[in-house]
Amino acid sequence: PAMLGILGGGQLGRMFAMAAKTMGYRVTVLDPDAGAPAADFADVHLCAAYNDHAALRELAETCAAITTEFENVNAESMRWLAQHVPVSPSGDCLAIAQDRIQEKAWIRKAGLATAPYLALDTVADLNHDLSPYLPGILKTARLGYDGKGQVRVQTASDARAAYADLGGQPCVLEKMLPLRCEVSAIVTRSNAHEVAVFPLAENRHRNGILDISIVPAQLAPALAEEAQRMAVRLAEALDYIGVLAVEFFVLEDGAEVALVINEIAPRPHNSGHYTIDACVTSQYQQQVRAMCGLHPGATGLLSPVVMVNLLGDSWRADGGEPNWDVLMQAPNTHLHLYGKAEARPGRKMGHYCVLAADSEAALQQAEAIKDTL
Ligand code: ATP
Ligand code: MG
Ligand code: MG
């Protein structure tokens, strides 16, 4: 069987490897962490840095196709690999997704809405009139996730102080928008340019980290379809091959534009874990299909579903697991654990999905279970 390579061996890589193995492939994971969650399901674990030459050469020589699950992998590594073996997504798309300034410019270039924002490439850009972006959020252009590298600012002097606090690195200042809710669309685009979009998920966060995804999102069908179309349009504008997650803000009624794109992730997404248990094809199977030049699979929803993230906070101080009793006895519930040895606050340890007749019922059951963990 063909060997597939993946840069990054976190939980997304683990679920990718499981899908690839189910589909009959072998898997090589490159991840510098000896305890990487994906290593349990990999045939080969190259335990090295993402720009390690010997490891990249081995990937190029042994793999039929290569992908990534970690958006901050060196784009240069992907570009080098692409000279030898099919790589998706491309290094160029990764580079765009790694930099909020480029990301937002591309979203606008595709004719799609973002929050009003000002790119702060250098400290001199703080001399612009900041008032159109206030009150706002200052976000580092690179390496932010789970709300890290962000400061909420009310005034221009707040923004200047926060820019210095963040180390004077390139940032974007984004206007704080009134959100009705947040949703995400996950689109798969093949190298033959076929596209398939999963049903929208409504995403609720807690302390800046995704907490719950509700599917289908409780949104007017026309708005949901518009979000799906926007995600496809962006994938096409980027000439993106692979699985692309697009996060949206749904603005309060009365706002001029109802949907704006917040950011993208060049990979399967936490809000798409539900596809494993509730869709004809999972987002990880889509990643396998796309990287292998196969048609995207059907994205139909088999059942309404709610996904709940399990963070290290739910583990006991001595590392003891949560009490799974109620979860195990609940009907139509799937538990996924990522095999991480150490539970730290805020660390994603696993998730569970609850299937029910409608998403409201699934949400109630999911929350009732959460209270018992
Ligand atoms: P992720 O882990 O999703 O990559 P991140 O650290 O890249 O997160 P964002 O998605 O940009 O950060 O922002 C985190 C959260 O902060 C959003 O999901 C949203 O709830 C809130 N937020 C961000 N930007 C805005 C905005 N312009 N207006 C209102 N709320 C916002
Ligand atoms: Mg992000
Ligand atoms: Mg986000």
Image (spheres, rainbow, N blue to C red):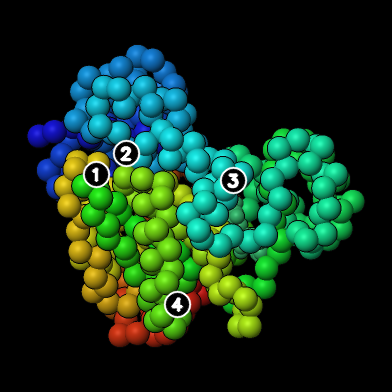
What residue would you read off at disc 3?
100
Label 4 or label 2, whichever lies nearer to me, is: 4
x and y percentages locating residue 33 in the rendered image: 44, 30
Mark 4 to mark 2 CA distance (whole Å): 30 Å
Residue plotted at (63% across, 83% down): 254
Say if mark 1 contacts mark 4, CB within 8 Å.
no
Mark 2 to mark 3 CA distance (whole Å): 20 Å
Q: Quadrant of residue 42?
A: top left
Comparing 339 with 249, the one in front is 249
Q: Earlier in the sequence, mark 4 or mark 2?
A: 2
- Is the CB atom of the residue marked by disc 3 within 8 angstroms of ligand 1's nearest atom? yes
Kindly give the residue lying farthest to the left in the view shown: 1
Amino acid type at image mark 1: Asn
Q: Is residue 18 visible?
A: no
What residue would you read off at disc 1?
191
Question: Mark 2: few, some, or many residues within 10 Å (few <14, many ≥20)?
Answer: many
Residue 223: give its label.
Answer: 4
Amino acid type at image mark 4: Leu
Residue plotted at (41% across, 80% down): 222
Mark 3 to mark 4 CA distance (whole Å): 25 Å
Q: Earlier in the sequence, mark 1 or mark 4?
A: 1
Amino acid type at image mark 2: Ser
